[in-house]
Amino acid sequence: MSEKIISFKNVSKTYILYKSDAARFKALFIKPRNPKTNKALNDVSFDINRGESVGVIGDNGAGKSTLLKMITGVAFPDCGEIFVDGKVAALLELTAGFSLEMTGRENIYLKGYILGLEDSYIKEIEENIIEFAQLGEYIDQPVRTYSSGMKMRLGFAINVNIEPDVLVVDEALAVGDASFKKKCKDKIKEIINAGTTVLYVSHNANSVKEICPRSIYLRKGAIIFDGPTEEALQVYNDYKESQKNKKKK
């Protein structure tokens, strides 16, 4: 019998859209009247079993990022139930949580503490992370001296080396040069083969097909299709084609 590792039951999430940061700040004290809203997720339900690799596809604004943020615990639903069993590593905002004044090595420990890892475990995986990131002597320099690509490489290296139960990937393979991108892709495949559950968001259909046998297609916050990736992509492409034809008329 398959073991459930992620479960969404009737999950919905609505965001209030503010005209400016000032309006957002004002809303902390005064509830806005008739605010403009966006339903990011609308009554979403699905189960993912341990060891599955599942693609999440759809246009910008479909609710993909909101779904992933809920799995990682960054966002919370307005209603519904979410169950996630195990340690989650997220390749979303790779540089989030870094201290610019601390060195790369010190940031490995900082990120580890944020993820709830023990000192002894971080020390155990430290050299693997440094070797994977390929930053050379920069590992002991302040992160403020890093290029954006170097920071992303360090963030990627940390997340893929902590042996997560669930790995969440959102278009994170665009890291560094071609050889490093291949290294990242190979690492994700290695993690999948080791039995880690993977959720993968990408606009690259070939990449999704290569990594995920199953895909969830979201449109305007709702699940349109959940099943074999080839079929999910066909439903998605058919819809995009129909929208193009409507515009031509």
Image (spheres, grey):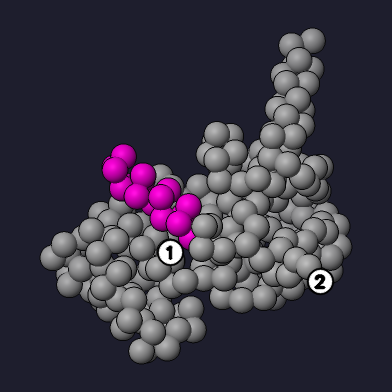
The quadrant in which the N terminus is found is bottom right
Q: Residue at x 66, y 66 (%)?
A: 50
Tell me the quarter of the picture where residue 48 sits: bottom right
Residue nearest the viewer, comparing 135 with 209: 209
> Does residue 26 appear in this view?
no
Mark carried by residue 238: none
Q: Which residues are magenta?
A: 175-191
Q: Residue at x 62, y 54 (%)?
A: 53
Q: Is residue 184 left or right of residue 193?
A: left
Q: Residue at x 40, y 76 (%)?
A: 111
The quadrant in which the C terminus is found is top right
Q: Is residue 189 magenta?
A: yes
Residue nearest the viewer, comparing 157 with 194: 194
Residue nearest the viewer, comparing 58 with 234: 234
Residue type, numbered disc 2: Glu
Q: What residue is shown with label 2?
A: 81
Where residue 221 appears, as percent x and y from the top left, is: 77, 49
